[in-house]
Image (cartoon, rainbow, N blue to C red):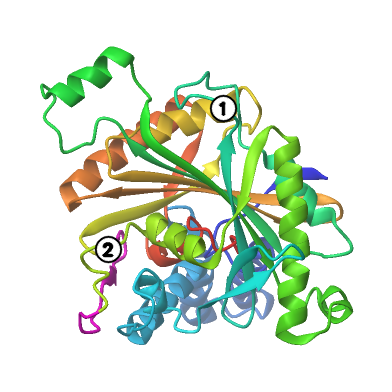
């Protein structure tokens, strides 16, 4: 399979076709008064033609005007639907907007438990990747993200998965709240830059039961058949990852819940099961907040080349930002023909709005130095969050 870049959320349908129709309508409206030999008609058709032109070429932050209106409409709908969530507290922030999310356990033939999550329309399992016996501070090019290994799952005709996702979740060292002259901060300054205190990598495999109906029916059908089909797919992806030089651990249900909580930066205090249900998240046009942490997500509209040489440099550069955490996600799905469509997202989390603004400036600067272009997902911060936690991408 060959790679191909994928447009970000918010760009719907065939944008080029819609714009062409609007421009053709504008041209027809402008020409009508002259075709009917009544120039005075331009007073009525002219403003409409102008609106068509604005609709075709107007917009902001990389979106055409029609897409911006749809993004705004979706944003308002999410605001109205958000409700306090009960149940597993680590998942509560996600369930405030996606109340149908449920986890379950399916066992391998050897009896090992594997956690899965879904909402009835999809099912996802997650693998944690670790370098084999390597120190945290290794050469950047030693272990690039195994994009090719996980992309191979998209060409599997026996169990056709809908998407796969690679996420690198990093926490910096020293922690951003430490004074620069503190002992811990000075110790890390002696080691050098770009040293994450903690770096976790996940691969999420997502199955659409309807699209993989043959594989589901072959394994008993229904929910059980879907779980077994996903289990087959995630085991094959884990094998591919191990072949790329990593250790691959398929997460159990408790481990999966913990991974999602870690990715969302949920607070241990807020997870108190005795606490009354209350809203723990808030989405604004520029931020998503959860348990006191502030998040903002960017789409890479000009991603760096994902090669063994350049991708480690990029991930290291953005993963060492002075923020609470940085998540870089590469989402892969089937493209046209035998191509793989991919989209890349970066989410940063900070302890306050001011800290987040400062980290955002540094992120944009570092991405520019790496030859990448970023667009902040204004009005789509919750979809941006979903694209950067291990739920499978799409």
Residue 20 found in image quarter? bottom right
Residue 181 versus residue 342 in the image, above or below: above
Query: Which residue is painted at 73% across and 67% down in the image?
Result: 230
* Side of 332 relative to 199 (left or right): right
Q: Residues within 10 Å of mark 2 (few under 14, many from 20)?
A: many
- What span is in magenta? 274-290
In which quadrant of the rendered image does the N terminus lie?
A: top right
Residue 368 versus residue 33 in the image, above or below: above
Q: Which residue is mark 1?
A: 133
**Residue 237 visible at all:** yes
Q: Nearer the viewer, residue 73 or 315?
A: 315
**Residue 210 visible at all:** no
Q: Earlier in the sequence, mark 2 or mark 1?
A: 1
In which quadrant of the rendered image does the C terminus lie?
A: bottom right
Image position, residue 256 (x, y; %): 51, 62
Magenta segment, prevailing SS (helix, strand or loop): loop
Image position, residue 263 (x, y; %): 41, 55
């Amino acid at each position: 399979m060959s790679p191909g870049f994928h447009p970000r959320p918010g760009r719907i349908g065939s944008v080029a076709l819609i714009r062409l129709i609007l421009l053709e309508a504008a041209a027809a409206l402008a020409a009508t008064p002259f075709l009917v030999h009544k120039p005075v008609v331009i007073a009525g058709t002219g403003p409409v033609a102008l609106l068509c032109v604005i609709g075709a070429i107007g917009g902001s932050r990389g979106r055409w005007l029609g897409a911006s209106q749809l993004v705004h409409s979706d944003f308002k709908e999410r605001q109205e639907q958000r409700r306090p969530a009960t149940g597993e507290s680590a998942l509560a922030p996600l369930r405030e907007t996606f109340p149908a999310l449920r986890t379950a356990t399916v066992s391998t033939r050897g009896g090992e438990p594997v956690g899965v999550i879904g909402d009835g329309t999809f099912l996802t399992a997650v693998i944690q990747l670790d370098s084999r016996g390597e120190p945290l501070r290794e050469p950047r090019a030693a272990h690039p993200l195994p994009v090719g290994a996980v992309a191979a799952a998209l060409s599997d005709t026996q169990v056709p998965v809908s998407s796969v996702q690679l996420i690198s979740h990093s926490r910096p060292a020293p922690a951003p709240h430490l004074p620069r002259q503190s002992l811990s901060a000075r110790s890390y300054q002696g080691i050098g830059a770009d040293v994450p205190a903690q770096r976790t990598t996940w691969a999420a495999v997502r199955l659409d039961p309807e699209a993989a109906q043959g594989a589901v029916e072959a394994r008993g059908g229904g929910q059980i058949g879907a779980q077994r089909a996903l289990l087959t797919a995630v085991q094959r992806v884990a094998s591919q990852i191990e072949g790329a030089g990593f250790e691959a651990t398929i997460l159990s249900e408790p481990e999966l819940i913990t991974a999602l909580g870690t990715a969302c930066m949920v607070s241990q205090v807020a997870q108190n099961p005795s606490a009354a249900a209350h809203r723990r998240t808030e989405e604004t046009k520029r931020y998503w907040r959860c348990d006191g942490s502030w998040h903002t997500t960017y789409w890479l509209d000009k991603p760096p080349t994902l090669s063994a040489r350049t991708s480690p440099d990029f991930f290291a550069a953005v993963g060492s930002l002075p923020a609470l955490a940085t998540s870089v996600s590469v989402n892969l799905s089937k493209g046209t023909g035998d191509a793989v469509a991919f989209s890349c997202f970066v989410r940063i989390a900070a302890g306050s709005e001011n800290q987040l603004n400062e980290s955002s400036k540094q992120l944009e600067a570092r991405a520019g130095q790496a030859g990448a272009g970023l667009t902040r997902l204004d009005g789509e911060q919750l979809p941006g969050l979903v694209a950067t936690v291990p739920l499978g991408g799409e």
